[in-house]
Image (tube, grey):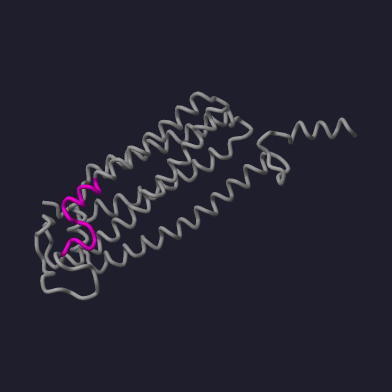
Amino acid sequence: MIESHATTQEVHGHRALQHHFENMEQQREAGTIGMWVFLVTEIMFFGGMFLAYALYRNMFPAAFASASNHLDITLGAVNTGVLILSSFTMAMAVYFTQVGKQRPQIIALVLTLILGLAFLGIKAVEYHEKYTDRLIPGHLIPGASFGPAVQEHDQPMDAHKLHLLPGATLKQVEMFYWIYFAMTGMHALHMIIGAGLLIFLIIWSMKGRFDPEYHGPVEVVGLYWHFVDIVWIFLFPLLYLLGRHFEH
């Protein structure tokens, strides 16, 4: 009986096993399910923003196309490539953790972090350009803030080098930038959180906390990172490619 109990402790006594789980597999599955539940709530959160985008794009197609053409498609495309590459390095980090290769695992996590920070740096450059061009909600229309009333000076004009299409007004363009900064800003916030989680994983990896039996945290952070990347895959064409055929 004593020998049987000792054997059970050997099988289920991993240092990372929490007391309320029977074994490491059950603990890993619980963590994965918890992350999927969280991601479902995130889908609903971003879904509301996508719905607002769809409604206002249908209301102001010319203004949205005009505003979209002012976004830097090159920086947006580079950021898309950066995030796709970061998803690959994150997947490799999960794989190396599962097979117990510590050094490649750490390298993959560091590369993912660097790519994530590169994305945020490029996004900061884009935000600075919009600030320089005064394409910030509340500053597009001189002497007026965004509101339901239409001002007399809110007529199609080229004050911000927007090349407004017929039927578009600055008031409508301002709505595009409200949505643009809301969606990309929330995405950037999720990227910052993801970068923080990666730093945590790198520190723990260097301490040898993960092994083929205990790699749940790397997997769930990987799911989170892939979700954030997928959100950008939708944001890029909706925000940057809209009305691109009107560019010339």
**Image quadrant containing the N terminus:** top right
Residue at the (19%, 61%) spot, across then down: 139
Residue at the (48%, 46%) spot, across then down: 224
Q: In this view, does 55 lie above or below 181?
A: below
> In this view, which residue lies farthest toward the front?
143
Q: Is residue 206 above or below residue 135?
A: above
Q: Position of residue 163 (x, y in %)?
A: 11, 57
Q: Is residue 232 magenta?
A: no
Q: Position of residue 115 (x, y in %)?
A: 36, 36
Residue at the (12%, 60%) spot, across then down: 164
Left or right: residue 31 versus residue 200 is right
In-front residue for pair 29/14: 14
Q: Is residue 164 above or below residue 248?
A: below
Left or right: residue 24 versus residue 188 is right
Q: Does the magenta stretch include residue 139?
A: yes
Left or right: residue 206 versus residue 113 is right
Magenta stretch: give its range. 126-141
